[in-house]
Image (cartoon, helix red, strand yellow):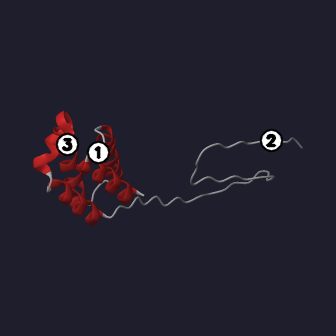
Protein backbone atom coordinates (compact mmCIF):
# COMPACT_ATOMS: atom_id res chain seq x y z
CA UNK A 1 0.00 0.00 0.00
CA UNK A 2 1.32 3.44 -0.87
CA UNK A 3 0.72 6.65 0.98
CA UNK A 4 -0.79 9.41 -1.11
CA UNK A 5 -0.99 12.91 0.24
CA UNK A 6 -3.39 15.45 -1.15
CA UNK A 7 -2.99 19.06 -0.12
CA UNK A 8 -5.82 21.45 -0.85
CA UNK A 9 -5.38 25.19 -0.48
CA UNK A 10 -8.09 27.77 -0.82
CA UNK A 11 -11.81 27.55 -0.72
CA UNK A 12 -13.74 24.80 -2.38
CA UNK A 13 -17.28 23.68 -2.88
CA UNK A 14 -18.89 20.54 -4.25
CA UNK A 15 -15.74 18.50 -3.60
CA UNK A 16 -15.74 14.78 -2.93
CA UNK A 17 -12.78 12.73 -1.74
CA UNK A 18 -12.75 8.99 -1.64
CA UNK A 19 -10.20 7.26 0.56
CA UNK A 20 -8.97 3.68 0.77
CA UNK A 21 -11.42 2.29 -1.74
CA UNK A 22 -10.58 0.13 -4.71
CA UNK A 23 -12.56 -0.38 -7.89
CA UNK A 24 -15.39 1.84 -6.72
CA UNK A 25 -17.17 4.85 -8.04
CA UNK A 26 -19.01 7.82 -6.67
CA UNK A 27 -21.71 10.03 -8.03
CA UNK A 28 -22.47 13.51 -6.92
CA UNK A 29 -25.45 15.62 -7.80
CA UNK A 30 -24.76 19.29 -7.59
CA UNK A 31 -27.71 21.59 -7.52
CA UNK A 32 -26.35 24.98 -8.38
CA UNK A 33 -29.17 27.38 -8.01
CA UNK A 34 -27.70 30.81 -7.91
CA UNK A 35 -30.32 33.00 -6.37
CA UNK A 36 -30.60 36.70 -5.90
CA UNK A 37 -33.39 38.77 -4.46
CA UNK A 38 -34.37 40.50 -7.69
CA UNK A 39 -36.84 42.80 -5.91
CA UNK A 40 -34.12 44.08 -3.55
CA UNK A 41 -31.84 44.66 -6.53
CA UNK A 42 -34.53 46.66 -8.33
CA UNK A 43 -35.16 48.65 -5.15
CA UNK A 44 -31.41 49.32 -4.81
CA UNK A 45 -31.15 50.44 -8.45
CA UNK A 46 -34.09 52.79 -7.97
CA UNK A 47 -32.36 54.36 -4.97
CA UNK A 48 -29.25 54.99 -7.04
CA UNK A 49 -31.31 56.46 -9.88
CA UNK A 50 -32.71 59.08 -7.48
CA UNK A 51 -29.20 60.57 -7.38
CA UNK A 52 -28.67 60.55 -11.14
CA UNK A 53 -28.36 64.34 -11.30
CA UNK A 54 -25.25 64.27 -9.08
CA UNK A 55 -23.56 61.17 -10.48
CA UNK A 56 -21.43 63.35 -12.76
CA UNK A 57 -20.09 65.29 -9.76
CA UNK A 58 -19.41 62.13 -7.77
CA UNK A 59 -18.03 59.87 -10.50
CA UNK A 60 -16.68 62.33 -13.07
CA UNK A 61 -15.83 60.62 -16.36
CA UNK A 62 -17.04 57.26 -14.93
CA UNK A 63 -20.66 58.48 -14.54
CA UNK A 64 -21.69 57.21 -17.97
CA UNK A 65 -20.26 53.77 -17.24
CA UNK A 66 -22.07 53.75 -13.88
CA UNK A 67 -25.37 54.60 -15.59
CA UNK A 68 -24.86 51.86 -18.20
CA UNK A 69 -24.21 49.22 -15.52
CA UNK A 70 -27.25 50.38 -13.55
CA UNK A 71 -29.41 50.08 -16.68
CA UNK A 72 -28.07 46.60 -17.48
CA UNK A 73 -28.61 45.42 -13.90
CA UNK A 74 -32.15 46.80 -13.88
CA UNK A 75 -33.08 45.11 -17.17
CA UNK A 76 -31.84 41.71 -16.02
CA UNK A 77 -33.39 42.00 -12.57
CA UNK A 78 -36.79 42.97 -13.97
CA UNK A 79 -36.69 39.91 -16.23
CA UNK A 80 -35.38 37.82 -13.31
CA UNK A 81 -32.69 36.52 -15.61
CA UNK A 82 -29.04 35.57 -15.37
CA UNK A 83 -28.17 36.05 -11.69
CA UNK A 84 -24.49 35.35 -12.38
CA UNK A 85 -24.36 38.24 -14.89
CA UNK A 86 -26.11 40.50 -12.38
CA UNK A 87 -23.49 39.60 -9.76
CA UNK A 88 -20.70 40.40 -12.22
CA UNK A 89 -22.28 43.77 -13.02
CA UNK A 90 -22.82 44.53 -9.33
CA UNK A 91 -19.17 43.74 -8.60
CA UNK A 92 -18.05 45.95 -11.48
CA UNK A 93 -20.27 48.74 -10.16
CA UNK A 94 -18.80 48.28 -6.69
CA UNK A 95 -15.23 48.47 -8.06
CA UNK A 96 -16.06 51.67 -9.91
CA UNK A 97 -17.57 53.12 -6.75
CA UNK A 98 -14.57 52.20 -4.64
CA UNK A 99 -12.24 53.58 -7.30
CA UNK A 100 -13.64 57.11 -7.20
CA UNK A 101 -12.92 57.72 -3.55
CA UNK A 102 -14.96 58.41 -0.48
CA UNK A 103 -17.96 60.24 -1.88
CA UNK A 104 -21.28 59.68 -0.15
CA UNK A 105 -23.01 58.13 -3.17
CA UNK A 106 -20.03 55.95 -4.09
CA UNK A 107 -19.70 54.67 -0.53
CA UNK A 108 -23.43 53.96 -0.36
CA UNK A 109 -23.30 52.01 -3.62
CA UNK A 110 -20.32 49.92 -2.52
CA UNK A 111 -21.87 49.11 0.87
CA UNK A 112 -25.28 48.40 -0.65
CA UNK A 113 -23.80 45.94 -3.10
CA UNK A 114 -22.00 44.10 -0.31
CA UNK A 115 -25.35 43.53 1.37
CA UNK A 116 -26.98 42.31 -1.85
CA UNK A 117 -24.47 39.68 -2.89
CA UNK A 118 -23.35 38.24 0.43
Left or right relative to 67: residue 21: right
- Residue depicted at 79% across the width and 53% down the height: 21
- Residue depicted at 66% across the width and 56% down the height: 26
- Residue depicted at 28% across the width and 64% down the height: 40
As displayed, is residue 59 above or below residue 47? above
Using the rendered image of the protein, determine whether residue 69 is visible from the camera's viewpoint. Answer: yes
Q: Nearer the viewer, residue 52 or 82?
A: 52
Q: CA distance from mark 1 to mark 2?
A: 45 Å
**Residue, disc 3:** 58
Q: Within 10 angstroms of label 2, few (less than 14), some, or many (20 or more) residues?
A: few
Quadrant of residue 16 within the rendered picture: bottom right
User: Residue 108's spot in the image, x, y percent?
Assistant: 29, 53
**Residue, disc 1:** 93
Total count of labels: 3
In what element is the residue under mark 3?
A: helix
**Residue, disc 2:** 4
Q: CA distance from mark 3 to mark 2?
A: 56 Å
Q: Nearer the viewer, residue 7 or 79?
A: 7
Quarter holding the N terminus is top right
In what element is the residue under mark 1?
A: helix
User: Residue 113's spot in the image, x, y percent?
Assistant: 33, 54
- Do the residues under discs 3 and 2 have CB atoms within 8 angstroms? no
In what element is the residue under mark 2?
A: loop
Q: Earlier in the sequence, mark 1 or mark 2?
A: 2
Identify the mark at residue 61; answer none if there is no mark. none
Q: CA distance from mark 3 to mark 1?
A: 14 Å
Q: Nearer the viewer, residue 83 or 51?
A: 51
Q: Nearer the viewer, mark 3 or mark 2?
A: 3
Q: Within 10 angstroms of label 1, few (less than 14), some, or many (20 or more) residues?
A: many
Q: Earlier in the sequence, mark 3 or mark 2?
A: 2
Q: Within 10 angstroms of label 3, few (less than 14), some, or many (20 or more) residues?
A: many
Left or right relative to 10: residue 44: left
Amino acid sequence: MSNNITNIWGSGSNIQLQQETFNSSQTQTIVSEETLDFEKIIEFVNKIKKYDNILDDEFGNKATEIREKITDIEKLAKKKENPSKIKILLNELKKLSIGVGQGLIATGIAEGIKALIM
